[in-house]
Amino acid sequence: MHDTRIDALARQLVSYSTSLKKGEKVLIDLFDVPDAMGLALIRAARAKGALPFVRVHQARLTRELLKGAEDGQYAIMSKHLLAEMRDMDAYIAIRGGTNIAETSDVPAERMQLAMKHLRPVLDYRVKKTKWSVLRWPSPSMAQQAGMSTEAFEDFYFKVCLLDYKALIPAMNALRKLMDKTDRVEITGPGTDLKFSIKDIPAIVCGGCFNVPDGEVFTAPVRDSVEGYVTHNAPTIYQGIAFDGIRLEFSKGRVVKAEAGSKTQALNKILDTDEGARYIGEFALGVHPLILEPMRDILFDEKIAGSFHFTPGQAYEDADNGNRSQVHWDMVNIQRKDYGGGEIRFDGKLIRKDGIFLPKTLAKLNG
């Protein structure tokens, strides 16, 4: 029996997230996704008079290519992918898979080589197209979340189909507050951070880019970060699982990075290039239905009462000048059930234990 929620999600991605118009070209990028979702997206795009183009990927084939990645090979691949992207007005990617650690045994130097060549494709897509990226629910994701497959599917469609428009007024109020702020102070268990966000724009993410969505982000002034942060949400990067990452900063740079038995792997990633040890994004998560981490950053970075602090590449819309092949969202949850914490803007307490205090932001508390 066909799941009508698939059609609803396709319509939201086409009508709201990317706002496709007649004659626009959209690349539909499918990674280990059931045909039903691809079909729904093609039909939804056509219903708007748009022209759908489709690419289909399989994780095990991608892994095999990455394991033997050569410079010339990925240069050619990047050339053709970039040419295709330049023909597109919009981009929708749905990324599924049965094993989140599929690329964990790809040598780091091969992964970095591939990412170096593919970065221009990503940059063009982010800067020049209307885009939306989301995961596809699978038993492995349900297992990560500690849920049954059916319960996780219900959760997935609820959070993806949230009425994002209802959150926009309060998210805009948070954006305006961040735009007026110079100094940010964040404290909590294992965390004492100070930095400036002066003159760097804040951006509202309300269902138009990553789905599920629900964050307001900016970036710290590149050399302003001082102190330390301990990320209490688990994370996975380049197929490697990390827990309890602790970073220390001096003049904006990560001068010490620890992650228990994964400390060496953590530092190897942070040594990818100069920009990987500087922060490219600071964001507050506000999705009212996402409460627990599951090692999937498209969900975890939106957790209610969280913030993420991102080593690596800054976004052009909120640019502090940092450039890197790395962009690694690391999440700290500040609700009481995770130990609490406080965020101050220019000395004023804005959020305590994950709860926004200004009345204009009350709707972001769920």
Image (cartoon, rainbow, N blue to C red):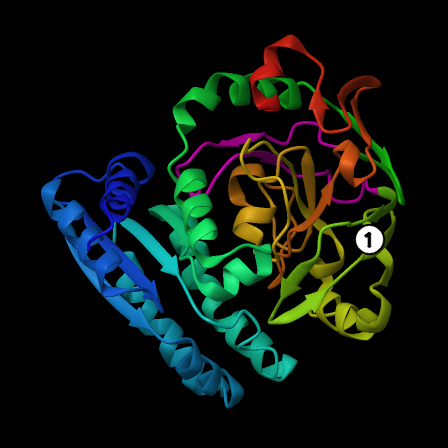
- The residue located at (37%, 37%) in the rendering is 161
Above-or-below relation of 129 to 103? above
Residue toward you, 318 or 347: 347
Rendered image quadrant of residue 178? top right
Can you say which quadrant of the picture contains the N terminus?
Answer: bottom left
> Which residue is tagged 1?
253
Residue 192 in the image: state x and y as whole percent.
Answer: 89, 39
Task: Name the foreground residue: 256 vs 252.
Answer: 256
Q: Is residue 155 left or right of residue 338?
A: left
Q: In the current view of this chain or complex, which residue is farthest to the top?
A: 359
Residue 222 belongs to the span the image colors magenta: yes
319 versus 78 height, above or below = above
The furthest residue to the bottom: 68
Residue 111 x/y as whole percent: 57, 77
Q: Main secondary structure of the magenta part?
A: loop
**Res. 197 image quadrant:** top right
* Total number of numbered discs in the rendering: 1
Determine whether 348 is above or below 260 in the image.
Answer: above
Query: What is the secondary structure assignment of the residue under circle 1?
Result: strand
What amino acid type is highlighted by mark number 1? Arg
Left or right for 331, reference 145: right
Q: Is 349 within the magenta?
A: no
Residue stretch in magenta = 196-225
Residue, x 39% and y 24% (percent of image)? 165
Crowd band around label 1 with a 10 angstrom C-alpha radius: few (<14), some (14–19), many (20+): many
Looking at the image, which is closer to me, 191 or 204?
Answer: 191
The C terminus, quarter of image:
top right
The spot of residue 294 in percent (x, y) is: 61, 54
